Image (cartoon, rainbow, N blue to C red):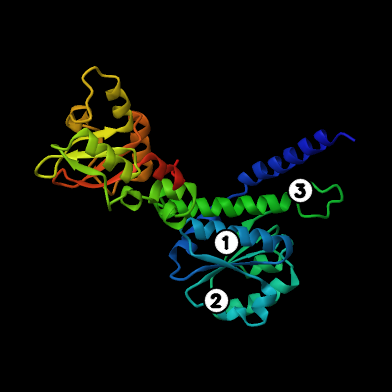
Amino acid sequence: MDFKKIAKNVLKLEAKELLDTVDKIDDEMRQAVELIAGIKGKLIITGVGKSGLIGAKIAATMASTGTSSFFIHPTEALHGDLGMIGKDDAVLAISYSGESEELIKILPHIKRFDIPLIAMARDKNSSLGRYGDVFLPIYVSKEACPLGAAPTTSTTLTLAMGDALSVCLMYKKDFKKEDFASFHPGGSLGKRLFVKVKDLMHTKDLPIVNESTTLKDAVVIMSEGMLGNVLIKDKEGKLLAILSDGDLRRAVMRDDFSMDALAIEYATKNPKVIDDENLLASDALSFVEEFKIQLIAILNDKQQVAGVLHIHDLIEAGIK
């Protein structure tokens, strides 16, 4: 049996049904977006079986993209969870057939409280379609299942319709990547857009010495600081130079090398710094990588050291 061919046919069939639905999208999509964007409460999504599983995923997508939403199972709704639906909410009900018994039973109760209902089904004349204030079609001509029984193409289309609705709402609400980061502070995107330099930088027991410090004493401070660097300041506390372990290795090769010399003689003067602790950590990483440095000083408005950030801190925090 040619499973490669079968797999290709499944993808072609589902792709065709998605494209065929493009021409069926009408003004009711705009109505659905306006309805959801205008509610003061939450979008409640409900459905049974495979439609319920897809509904739960749509609810999760909505919630993560700026539309407060959660999923309720119709059976649980009949046994008390209807109380979770408030007068300021709206409901998105999903049933491919439009006749799912458990779902249809809760619709009169939803309408009794005059709660807006968006119906997602294959037929607008189905029971669900007739209850809906807005109707979004999820009709497919053929399931990918060879028996024509298991929801396959229809669930793919339902999920895609939910994605389309979610994206429309993102545009409606002008939802930006910074907003997404606020909902996903622990994800890679959230870390790139949410974590700032001040969240990661070291501020205590910094390896700082005066400009009159000898190399011998500076090396001791470097070892104690565990950052492989020493920061050198002037009498007013302003940063003058940074002595790195790389600078130290290069110094040893010089003919005039002396441990009794001033550390600043071997240090990197006018080092690269950041003067904004609110800079995104991802931007700081780009800065560090561009100039091929391991440690960067964070300065306050008086050009004094407020903290330091090591490349290892960025990597360990998962900044990419």
> Quarter holding the C terminus?
top left
Q: Which residue is mark 1?
A: 59
For badge 1, the amino acid type reads Ala
Task: For mark 1, give the secondary structure.
Answer: helix
Image height check: is 144 above or below 212?
A: below
Q: Nearer the viewer, residue 25 or 238?
A: 238
**Of callouts 2 and 3, which one flags the residue occurring earlier in the amino acid sequence?**
2
Give yes or no for contact between labels 3 and 1 (Cβ–Cβ under 8 Å): no
Mark 2 is surrounded, within 10 Å at the Cα level, by few (under 14), some (14 to 19) or many (20 or more) other residues, namely some
The part of the image, by quadrant, that contains residue 267 is top left
Q: Earlier in the sequence, mark 1 or mark 2?
A: 1
Tell me where residue 150 appears, x and y as whole percent.
80, 55
Q: Nearer the viewer, residue 63 or 245?
A: 245
Give the quarter of the image for residue 236.
top left
Q: Is residue 68 above or below residue 179?
A: below
Disc 3 marks a residue whose amino acid type is Ser
Q: Residue furthest top?
A: 255
Of tags 2 and 3, the one toward the viewer is 2
Mark yes or no: residue 193 visible.
yes
Quick check: marks 2 and 3 in contact, CB under 8 Å? no
**Kind of residue at badge 2:** Ile
* Mark 2, secondary structure of its residue: loop
Q: Of helix, strand and loop, which one carries label 3?
A: loop
Between 21 and 308, the residue placed more toward the observer is: 308
For this orientation, the residue located farthest to the right is 1
| Residue at mark 3 | 141
Q: Nearer the viewer, mark 1 or mark 2?
A: 1
Looking at the image, is mark 3 or mark 1 earlier in the sequence?
1
Q: Which mark is residue 85?
A: 2
Q: What residue is rendered at 67% in x and 80% in y?
A: 78
Q: Position of residue 51 (x, y in %)?
A: 69, 61
